[in-house]
Amino acid sequence: MGMDDKQPGLGSDGMTVDDLERGSGARLILLLNVIAEQEGDFALKDLAQQAGLPISSVHRLLQILVRTGMLERSKGTAYRAGRELFRLASRVLQHMDYRTLVRPYLRTLWDRWQETAVFTLYRPATHKALVVEVIQTPHPLRHMLEPDTELSLFWGSLGRSILAFLPDDAFAAAHAEAGPGPITHQPPADLAALGQEMEKIRADGVAFFCSEAAEMAGVAAPVFGPRGALIGSLGLTQPAYRYARLKAEDVAADVREQAAAFSEMLSFRKQRPDPKG
């Protein structure tokens, strides 16, 4: 074998694939995951401790990240996320295919309950929820909900499960712009009455809705993303008469579980924030 020949599975420096996976590449990925969980400035020793890596190794990797703009030096010996890291994250989020990502979680609910499973995105600019993905119930009697439909946050479980977790200023702005119900044509309840309902939704982690007049019902839970950012809602909708036959708490448990699992997949790992303080 000549000097330029390489054995299969070896790099130019003679390292195997396993060696590379245990080397600086894997350590850098691990370190980026730890950095993504930080809030504000952070110190070298804290990163090393959380990553379980030697301080010398972490210091060397941090210099690579600083040179590429992924990190910036802060006061003293502290670091913070750099502009290039935020730019990269923004580009990834712009191309995130929520429809594909959420489908397995909706399918789990659909398989269990055979009712329409829905995922919505919260739209702060309009104070509404946008239907992104739907798996329709096989039952012939159903309320047709199509993708790209905008929903009020004040009517139905999908909207209210978002509404309950809005900060006070966003909540007040949404209430000021809310129109009458799409079916009942009634105005939303006053802020005091809504406040009690929102407290219950936050405590339960799920919103229930059932209107005999509208012949509609549903159960939905909020979906959170990185750093606890409110993303939208996930739930089941059905005619009110079929909802009455279901065990609502069992439905709620499944909806909470799938919303939590989807949130986890979207990197929500910390305790859900309470915007009401």
Image: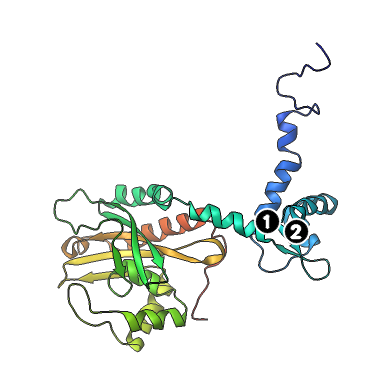
Q: Position of residue 126 (x, y in %)?
A: 37, 72
Q: Within 10 Å of the Cα at label 1, are there few (<14), some (14-19), or many (20+) other Cα atoms?
A: some
Q: Residue 167: percent from the left, percent from the top?
A: 47, 78
Few, some or many residues within 10 Å of mark 2 (<14, 14–19, 20+): many
Which residue has dot 1 on it? 34
Front-lying residue, 128 or 68:
68
**Residue at x 30%, y 79% (from the top left corner):** 178
Q: Residue at x 47, y 52 (%)?
A: 96
The kind of residue tagged 2 is Leu
| Residue 274 left/right relative to 145 | right
Residue that mark 2 sits on: 47
Residue drawn at x 46%, y 55% is 261
Asked if residue 232 lies left or right of residue 52, the reply is: left
Q: Quadrant of the N terminus?
A: top right
Picture coordinates of residue 183 (x, y %)? 17, 72
Work out how far the residue at label 1 is from the one at label 2, CA to CA, in angstroms.
Answer: 7 Å
Question: Helix, strand, or loop for circle 2?
Answer: helix
Q: Position of residue 85 (x, y in %)?
A: 65, 57
Quadrant of res 158: bottom left
Contact (Cβ within 8 Å) of mark 1 with mark 2:
yes
* Vertical comparison of 47 with 209: above or below: above
What colour scheme does the image use? rainbow
> Of 177 and 8, which appears nearest the observer?
177
